[in-house]
Image (cartoon, helix red, strand yellow):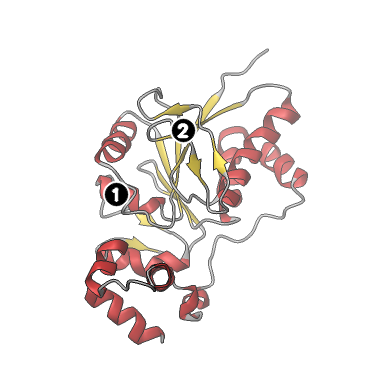
Amino acid sequence: MSVKSITFAFLLTDEFPVNSFILAQESLRIVNQYKLDEVFKYKIISEDGENVRSSNGMWWTPNYSLQDLFIPEYLVIFGGNLPIQKISKNMLSSLRYFHKNGSKLIAVDTGAFSLAEAGVITKNTKICLHWEAKKNFLERYPYKEVTDEKYILNDNGLYFSAGGVSILDLFLKIISDLKGKNFAKSVSEALIYVPQENFSDPAHNRRNASNNLICNKVIKIMEENIENPLKMREIAQEVNISLRSIERYFLNYF
């Protein structure tokens, strides 16, 4: 007897983390393969339905645009390296629409910026994202509660993953909650993976500034414009934070 499929929609944005995307997609595919049924459906979407470039330079062709999509049970937002510049009013209104109509929204890494900009995060919502982006997030949204957990499931339907392999732990948790521990176990065994504790080492935040997201972007812009150097205020506009914040990052880290 065929089971009712649960639908996941993967929203890809420019420079999205391809490793997290593949782990999320594979965890659902493995369940379908082992159970010989379409337990989970998954659709790949972009804002306008056009091809999207991932973090490793590969291009991906989506199945749908945001306008084409019906209401999925889960909408997974894969944020990119420049999350604020790539957020449009259309995307924000779509996120509010899906949330209002019952979709659970899963923000992967900088996808948290999208949910914050959409205004769906309440004061009681716990958030996590990659340690590289945490400081930048708090700079922009100082009133939000950001933890060192690898993933978070809030009662209001907002889920968060810190990115990387943590997305697999989150999806194993979701699969277990939806279909039982044996389903999740079959995925972890197929991937030869042992689920990890839901905690991220805050020592990551003390790494060298060369790993800092904003510092990297500023340096990259400088290198790309070395022949005709930009003014610092122009660079600040490019990375979408204040000049004072950039100065503070470089002073602290370098």
Residue occupying the point 41% across, 87% down = 254
* Quadrant position of residue 165: bottom right
> Is the residue 156 above or below the residue 232 in the image?
above
Give the amino acid type for the residue marked by disc 1 in the picture: Ile
Residue occupying the point 49% across, 62% down = 149
Any part of residue 44 in sight: yes
* Quadrant position of residue 241: bottom left
Q: Local crowd at mark 1 within 10 Å, few (<14), some, or many (≥20)?
A: some
Residue occupying the point 35% across, 26% down = 67
Where disc 2 sits, the SS reads strand
Give the amino acid type for the residue marked by disc 2 in the picture: Ile
- Residue that badge 1 annotates: 121
- Residue that badge 2 annotates: 45
Instruction: Choose mark 2 or mark 1, whichever is in front.
Output: 2
Where disc 1 sits, the SS reads loop
Q: CA distance from mark 2 to mark 1?
A: 23 Å
Of labels 2 and 1, earlier in sequence is 2
Measuring from the top left, give residue 155's x and y in whole percent. 38, 44
Measuring from the top left, give residue 104's x and y in whole percent. 41, 37
Query: Which numbered tag is attached to residue 78?
Result: none
Measuring from the top left, give residue 168's x and y in whole percent. 61, 49
Q: Nearer the viewer, residue 211 or 96?
A: 211
Measuring from the top left, give residue 51's x and y in whole percent. 48, 36
